[in-house]
Image (cartoon, rainbow, N blue to C red):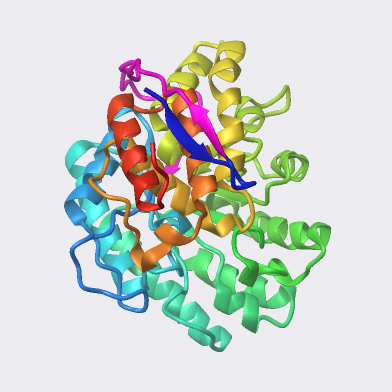
């Protein structure tokens, strides 16, 4: 059997899907690296909502997907931008997601960290921004999870310079019950974060970021760097205080950053681990044995898929992530909160399928082919 897949130039090409299923993977804990998958939420396809309505979530399917990730030895990074924070999932929905996922993590012994930000605000004074962060931090801490201090659109809009970032983050870190992960999300992921840390110059912003960390090393478990600049991440990683981890958020260069060099390595907190979970876990288990070459052999071929999913506008990478979850059988539909299943073109989705199938990511490639055929027919592509 073959599929006719649309290309960006409007032509159709013939593709022959693979037939062998994804091999099973052991779920032993990962040792040498902390690997956290930023997991998507599953929308409720039967809810009568509009893109402007509060998100309707299928909680059973959403939690089942997290159990899938935990079963392979991965941790879950909850309520991050993968879950469409600020793009369909409001703070009320995110708070419920944090509570439910943290409870599920306790029940199954899974590792979890949760995002805390200010997305209940559209703007505000520094005092209001601090209060919004504090509200979200309280929910995360009460759930028993470790917090990821996410970048704030409100702070990016309201800060007058680096001193405002130092004040807000210093205030928050002094009161955190447990060490947190600081998240620097670049404007490629969210244009509203342009000039974060008080400067559009990356070198200046890096100095402010490191000043925040250096002032509170006992309150910072690690930093998550999502700048899609491997050289900058490595340089920053080498300047972190002893004991502060670097979690790569670079979905373009993650194999080399996780493998590391003679001066250190990055752990991982990545959106691309949502579809790559089992394969990434197998790769890290090879790294646990010191087999860097085997690790790279498994993970390097996935970069082409990741770069495709995260191509500009990068913030819409979530559409490809959810497509692959549907094709892999983790959910029964291709529907997203806020209607974002329409955020990518059919040629983009077809290429995502082709790359994922070529990597052998689908537990049941026949199911994936059947579902892709259904999607193609909805767009008017005939066999």
Q: Quadrant of the C terminus?
A: top left
Q: Along the horizontal axis of the image, is 273 left or right of 182?
A: left
Query: What residue appears at the point 49 percent right and 14 percent down from the top-left corner?
Result: 286
Query: What residue appears at the point 21 percent right and 73 percent down from the top-left corner?
Result: 48
Q: Is the magenta stretch mostly helix, strand or loop?
A: loop
- Residue 57, placed above or below residue 152: above
Q: In which quarter of the image is the N terminus?
A: top left
Q: Pick whichever, 14 or 286, lies toward us.
A: 14
Query: What residue appears at the point 69 percent right and 41 percent down from the top-left corner?
Result: 237
Residue 34 seen in the figure: no
Report the magenta residues as a range.
12-38
Would you say residue 307 sits in the magenta stretch? Answer: no
**Residue 240 image position (x, y, % from top left):** 68, 44
| Residue occupying the far front of the picture | 382
Q: Along the horizontal axis of the image, is 199 left or right of 164?
A: right
Q: Pick whichever, 290 or 228, lies toward us.
A: 228
Would you say residue 27 sits in the magenta stretch? Answer: yes
Q: How many marks?
A: 0
Query: What residue appears at the point 58 percent right and 24 percent down from the top-left corner?
Result: 301
- Residue 273, placed above or below residue 9: above
């Amino acid at each position: 059997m073959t599929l006719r897949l649309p290309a960006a130039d409007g032509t159709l090409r013939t593709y022959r899907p693979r037939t062998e299923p994804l091999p099973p993977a052991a779920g032993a804990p990962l040792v040498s690296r902390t690997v956290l998958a930023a997991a998507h939420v599953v929308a409720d396809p039967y809810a009568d909502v509009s893109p402007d309505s509060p998100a309707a979530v299928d909680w059973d399917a959403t939690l089942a997907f997290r159990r899938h990730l935990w079963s392979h030895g991965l941790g879950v990074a909850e309520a991050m931008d993968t879950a469409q924070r600020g793009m369909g999932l409001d703070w009320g929905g995110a708070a419920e997601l944090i509570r439910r996922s943290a409870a599920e993590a306790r029940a199954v012994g899974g590792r979890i960290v949760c995002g805390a930000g200010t997305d209940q605000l559209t703007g505000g004074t520094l005092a209001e921004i601090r209060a919004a962060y504090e509200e979200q931090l309280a929910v995360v801490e009460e759930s028993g999870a470790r917090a990821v201090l996410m970048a704030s659109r409100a702070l990016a809009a309201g800060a007058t310079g680096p001193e405002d970032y130092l004040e807000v983050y210093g205030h928050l870190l002094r009161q955190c019950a447990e060490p947190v992960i600081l998240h620097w999300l670049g404007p490629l992921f969210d244009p509203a974060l342009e000039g974060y840390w008080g400067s559009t110059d990356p070198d200046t912003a890096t100095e402010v970021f490191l000043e925040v960390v250096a002032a509170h090393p006992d309150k910072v478990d690690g930093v998550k760097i999502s700048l899609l600049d491997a050289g900058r991440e490595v340089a920053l990683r080498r300047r972190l205080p002893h004991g502060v981890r670097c979690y790569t958020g670079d979905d373009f260069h993650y194999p080399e950053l996780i493998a590391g060099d003679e001066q250190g390595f990055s752990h991982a907190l990545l959106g691309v681990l949502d579809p790559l979970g089992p394969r990434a876990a197998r790769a890290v288990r090879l790294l646990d044995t010191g087999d860097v070459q085997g690790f790279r052999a498994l993970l390097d071929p996935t970069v082409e898929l990741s770069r495709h999913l995260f191509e500009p506008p990068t913030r819409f990478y979530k559409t490809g992530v959810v497509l692959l979850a549907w094709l892999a059988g983790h959910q029964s539909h291709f529907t997203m909160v806020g209607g974002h299943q329409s955020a990518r073109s059919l040629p983009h989705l077809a290429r995502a399928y082709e790359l994922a199938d070529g990597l052998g990511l689908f537990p049941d490639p026949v199911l994936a082919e059947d579902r892709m055929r259904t999607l193609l027919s909805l767009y008017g592509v005939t066999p």
